[in-house]
Image: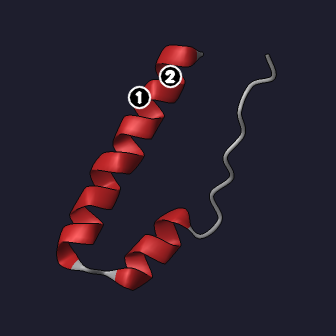
């Protein structure tokens, strides 16, 4: 599961980098607008 999560995060960051380079605000909102971040309990 951790490897899958790291892969997903890497894909999102790669996609976001392209969006940021284009300064495409609408695409950034579409990518991250509904994002939820959770951290595992320790």
Vertical side of 40 occupied by 29: above or below = below
> Horizontal and vertical percent for residue 7?
41, 28
Residue farthest toward the left in the current orientation of the protein: 21
> Horizontal and vertical percent for residue 24?
30, 81
> Horizontal and vertical percent for residue 11?
36, 42
User: At 39% across and 76% down in the image, what residue appears?
Assistant: 27
User: Looking at the rendered structure, which numbered label has been put on residue 4?
Assistant: 2
Q: Nearer the viewer, residue 38 or 19?
A: 38
State yes or no: discs 2 and 1 in contact (Cβ < 8 Å). Answer: yes
Vertical side of 24 occupied by 8: above or below = above
User: At 62% across and 58% down in the image, what residue appears?
Assistant: 35
User: At 26% across and 58% down in the image, what residue appears?
Assistant: 17
Q: Residues within 10 Å of mark 1 (few under 14, many from 20)?
A: few
The residue identified by callout 1 is 7
Position of 23 compared to 31: left or right?
Answer: left
Q: Nearer the viewer, residue 1 or 38?
A: 38
Give the position of the C terminus as an image quadrant: top right
User: At 48% across and 65% down in the image, what residue appears?
Assistant: 31
């Amino acid at each position: 599961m951790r490897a899958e999560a790291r892969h997903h995060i890497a894909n999102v960051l790669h996609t976001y980098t392209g969006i940021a380079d284009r300064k495409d605000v609408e695409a950034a909102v579409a990518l991250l607008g509904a994002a939820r971040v959770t951290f595992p309990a320790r």
